[in-house]
């Protein structure tokens, strides 16, 4: 199972103790660790608890011996563990369908905002079922937006009134969840460099650089090169024709120009 939003102060022994009551555990691996210093490895940073001040939580993968143990461990999803609301999902299982009417999009978040802050903030609107902050896969830092799912639709409706509320010094933006709007909002959060890189990548999608397409691209380049060479060779002849009338000296100069181009 995947276990998210675990406090960085938790130990492997403590996590094993909680989940072992559901079945035999084969392994536990911690991920999404952001060291306080670049010189520290993630493993050393977690063991010594030297985590980045803006990322004090980690994720873990708990591997059980049986499927039955996995199903029982899923009951911990949304419960409070070591002071944080944890997220427990079955790895590899189809993602559950999110109810659009019970979920809201939260934008303009500071990158250092933690999941727990949103749990506490939106608890004022109703029972929160899940909080998901979208994070960078490399750095583990937030991208500035996320989603909050409520148990009832009334909670999502009240959450819309939270727009403008300050979180970590920034007024947040809350809007109804929409599958069509999510990609656009995610793009808005990207930097200009990320948007240009994404556009360049999309322009190459579907291009097969092997076989006939590669030969076609090579032929196009050769044709462009030939056109350029031919245009350079013909340049002297065009210049002499601009005078309106060809003298003997002009024709001889033109011929000399062709020989040089050849």
Image (cartoon, rainbow, N blue to C red):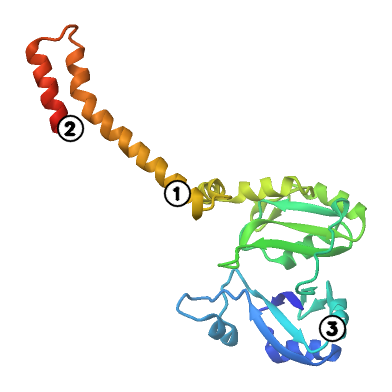
Kindly identify which numbered label has been placed on residue 67.
3
Residue labelled with disc 1: 215
Q: Which secondary structure lies at badge 2?
A: helix
Please say if 132 is above or below 10. Answer: above
Can you say which quadrant of the picture contains the N terminus?
bottom right
Q: CA distance from mark 3 to mark 2?
A: 77 Å
Q: CA distance from mark 1 to mark 3?
A: 51 Å
Could you tell me residue 211's position as x and y percent?
50, 54
Q: CA distance from mark 1 to mark 2?
A: 28 Å
Residue labelled with disc 2: 261
Sequence-wise, which precedes: disc 1 or disc 2? 1
The residue under the point 66% across, 55% down is 109
**Depth order, front residue of 37/73:** 73
Could you tell me residue 223's position as x and y percent?
36, 38
Please say if 26 is above or below 239. Answer: below
Quadrant of the rendered image containing residue 90: bottom right
Classify residue 7 as left or right of residue 46.
Answer: right
Sequence-wise, which precedes: disc 3 or disc 2? 3
């Amino acid at each position: 199972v995947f276990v998210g939003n675990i406090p960085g102060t938790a130990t492997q022994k403590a996590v094993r103790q909680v989940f072992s009551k559901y079945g035999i555990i084969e392994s536990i691996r911690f991920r999404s660790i952001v060291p306080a210093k670049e010189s520290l490895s993630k493993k050393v940073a977690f063991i010594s608890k030297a985590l980045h001040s803006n990322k004090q939580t980690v994720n873990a993968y708990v591997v059980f011996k049986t499927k039955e143990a996995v199903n029982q461990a899923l009951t911990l999803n949304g419960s409070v563990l070591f002071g944080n609301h944890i997220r427990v999902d079955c790895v590899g299982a189809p993602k559950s369908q999110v109810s659009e009417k019970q979920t809201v999009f939260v934008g303009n978040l500071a990158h250092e905002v933690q999941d727990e802050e949103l749990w506490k903030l939106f608890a004022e609107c109703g029972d929160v079922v899940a909080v998901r902050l979208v994070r960078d896969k490399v750095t583990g830092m937030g991208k500035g937006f996320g989603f909050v799912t409520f148990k009832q639709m009334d909670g999502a409706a009240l959450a819309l009134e939270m727009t403008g509320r300050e979180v970590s010094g920034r007024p947040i933006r809350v809007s109804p969840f929409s599958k069509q709007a999510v990609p656009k909002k995610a793009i808005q959060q990207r930097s200009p460099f990320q948007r240009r890189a994404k556009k360049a990548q999309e322009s190459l999608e579907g291009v097969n650089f092997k076989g006939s397409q590669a030969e076609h691209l090579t032929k196009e380049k050769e044709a462009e090169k030939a056109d350029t060479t031919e245009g350079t060779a013909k340049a002297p002849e065009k210049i002499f024709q601009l005078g309106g009338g060809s003298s003997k000296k002009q024709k001889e100069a033109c011929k000399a120009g062709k020989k040089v181009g050849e």
